[in-house]
Amino acid sequence: MQLRNNFNQPNYDPLLLWIILILSGVGLVMVYSASVDAAALKQISNYQNYYYLLRHFIYLIISLFCGFIAFLIPISFWQKFAPSFFILGLILLIAVLIPGIGKIVNGSQRWIPLGFMNFQPSEIVKLFTIIYAADYVLRKSRQIGTFTKGFLPISLAIAIIGTLLINQPDFGALVVVVCISLGILFLGGISLKIILGLTLSVPIGVYALLKIAPYRMDRITGFLAPFEDLYGKGWQLSHSLIAIGRGDFFGVGLGESIQKLQYLPEAHTDFVLAILSEELGLFGFTLIICLYILMIIRIFGISKISTQLRNNFSALLAQGIAIWFGTQAIINIGVNVGFFPTKGLTLPFVSYGGSALLVTFIASGILMRIDYENKIKAKRN
Amino acid sequence: MKQFSHQSDIFELSKNRRRVVLSLILLLFLMLFSRALYLQQIKKDFLQNKGDGFIVKNEVLQSYRGKIYDRNNNLLAVSSPTFDIGLSISHKLPKKHNDQIADNLTKENINEISKILKTDEKILLNKIKNKKKGYIYIQKRSSPETAKKLTAMRIPVLNFEKKYTRYYPNREASAHVVGKTDLNGIEGTEGLERQWDSILKGEKGHKKVVVDGVKRVIDDLNDFKLPKNGSDILTTIDNRLQHIAYEALKKYIGRYEANSGSAILIDAKNGDILVMTNFPSYNPNGVVKSYDSMRNRAITDVFEPGSTLKPISVAYAMEKKKIKHNEIIDTRDGFIRVGGRVIKDDHPQDQMSVKEIIQKSSNVGATKIGQRLESKDLWGLYNKLGFGAKINVGMPGESNGRLSEYSNWKEIDHATLTYGYGVNMNLLQLVKAYTVFANDGLMIKPKLYKNDNFVETERVLSSSTSKIMKDFMKSVVEEEEGTGTKARIPGYTVAGKTGTARKYHNGEYSKDYFASFIGMSPSSDPKFIAAVIVDTSTKKSFYGGAVAGPIFKDVMKNALKLYDVPYDKELNENLMNKMVKPQTGDAKL
């Protein structure tokens, strides 16, 4: 594999790579900081404070390796097997719901134990959905503007995934999958009338969801006024907000967070940003947001070149991944600052969690590949 | 590969739509940033205050409570460090781990803990299971040794809070005098602990600390005030005699199936209270079950003294020259009518000397002598002796007693007052009155504090009158005709008086009696005065001499022995064998 061209320019995108590495590095440090007390108090970690650090580091190494493998795979491969991946995703989502295969943690059946790690099918399904939707839009490019032949079939496919995700339940993943599919359909040329119709149907959908799972309502009231139920539903969010408030401009100092000391549950997974804000302040928070903005802009830049080079699948794939990373980061940060109800979504590249890390790195490998293929094609032209 | 891209290449993706999506994402990030800015700048104080509410704790630094000593520097009350042991349960409870109680605690841990604490493992387990998160106490007031053993286990969730627990080595014997604190050893609730609470407790300190979500201290904010330790209290109590007196009360009250009783012994020369004990009592080291057992009856409960008051009124008549000490009084028929009431003697005699009136405790004789006194004078005497006013010995719960003003007295009132009815008092007030006979007419105020060297005295009788009456009282015990022969002590002469007074209850005199004995020894130059009162339930002998006499003897005999008081009478072996049974108290010495 040739990583440099004849003019000694790198054939991969150094900016994107650096952003990913910086985010992962920050993530490694923050996961350690946020989990140090939780690990030291746990029997399963044998009271060793580096328990989560070590595991996160190993996941990171594996993820980097898998990302590199993804980089080696031509984009056409993903397009060719797009429907197969989609079916594989469905099978995994069904498998996780089968008692004996799926593992229940905190009331949700989201994990398939693999011995060395717990695999979360909903994470890989996000990527498979992007591949499938991008391929779908291009296959049906002539009918994509119509409702019955363009919009309806993929809606049904997404509805099936959605149903399976609700059964876990994993509403976070559901929101991400829906956002990704809608984004790709929109970018792929779906009729504006349908978009308008969907916009109107969102409130109805939310209402229906609340009817199906009433405990959602508690979460919603909890997130609107967390301090009114300080010792109940509002506990987690209150302490997330307290952590952010305590951080002030430059934070209380790395490792000095108090909210991570048995106050804020899930400090190293969903709420790692709150701990980061407490320790590194608004400064650290802004830095993270800037890195994400830079990353999204960069990915859209890659997709633009793909569009110009008429690599429509690559363009849609890159945009889908950008929407994925963007949506997930926005929702996670939104949960941390009290914008959205608690979802159970990790912060891409930063939060602790093997499956999420693995899949985001594979997606990053694909992005690098798209950029690489763009450069090859541009040179040829 | 080519054909895939061919098909899609025909189609052109919209530039505008891409811009819309990118803008939307950027807009949302901008909103998040402004929200964070709002939280960290505008809501900062609110959030930080909320945070401080959780993490900053003002920890109390307990002061070391002062000790209470007896006269020989033995401890009556002392605080010792103990540990409240707690567990911090963190937030997650894995459901399928059989071995795992909380995610920081295994069953094995619980097993070890319960072994060391000697508690039931199941109770401990339930306690933990009922509490999902937070802090639970698994044992309070554990010994430092237990805490040390548990610390050695290195279970990170175990927490130890150092506290001081009050310990009373004298248990029941001194419970009423010393009193007790609340269970935390902080607030004095009874006895001296209550009386001198502010002095004993000193001043609490505090320090501000940072605690984590399971209440472990993680940082010291260096904002503190050190505690000021409390001062010690030195009493005049004799630890050893307290035990002897308590055991004697317990034994004889049990034997006579009586209800309760009290004993007091004071130093006749300076008023030091060496013994003040009551039965029933309570163990101040534990939780008190019966509040009835908590009263310091010797100073809280009043009784009508009955015959024990006769030496006082009769001596006063001699002092006032209303009667000569060798005069013979006509006590024919064994009764006398006063104001429509009849006053009787239990053992009537035609005539009696003043000495015999005291020795045999004649109501008729005492009444006839008393009638020669002016009401005003008799009231003046009783008032001077302090009847109807508390002594202020420095203990909570002291009663005043009651002495009505002489202008309200009817003829019968004057008569009964001469032999101890119509006036009531607590036992210590009676003891105070008897200091007059032990000090040649000088009354001494009893005291409880060793550092209090001032002996408060007041002349009540002339030296000669008091000596004569003391001799009369000696005959009560030392002569075979006396009522108090059971109070005899080998090697020492005793001057004393028995009392058997009916209990005045709801406006009537009941069939229950207060049996009492008060006396001093050695009679030639009294070293101690002791008084015993027993609230009888009449099943067996209720005469003061029979019930209270032996208790008096136990206490007085041991006091004389312990303080090496020289004998003032021949140690008659035969007498000893006849009179003395093995003493309960001796073994304790």
Image: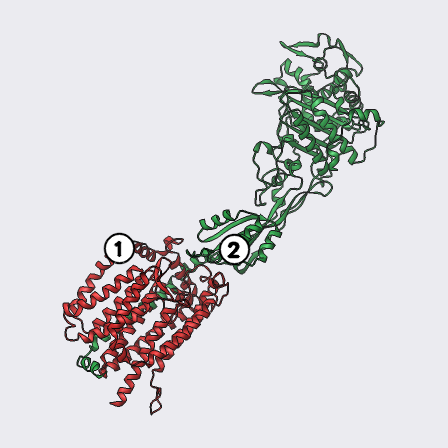
Q: How is the image coloured?
A: by chain
* Chain B, chosen colour in render: green
Up the image or down, A228 lies above or below B363; here it is: below
Up the image or down, B443 lies above or below B91; here it is: above
Residue drawn where x is 25% and y is 54% of the image: A211
Q: Element under label 2?
A: helix
- Farthest right residue in view: B570
- Farthest bottom residue in view: A6
The residue wearing badge 1 is A212
| Relative to A186, A265 lies left or right | right
- Tell me the quarter of the image containing the N terminus of chain B: bottom left
The residue wearing badge 2 is B108
Q: Element under label 1?
A: helix
At which x and y percent is residue B478? 79, 22
Label 2 CA crowd tier, 10 Å (few <14, some 14–19, many 20+): few
Label 1 CA crowd tier, 10 Å (few <14, some 14–19, many 20+): few
Tell me, yes or no, if residue B397 can be seen here.
yes
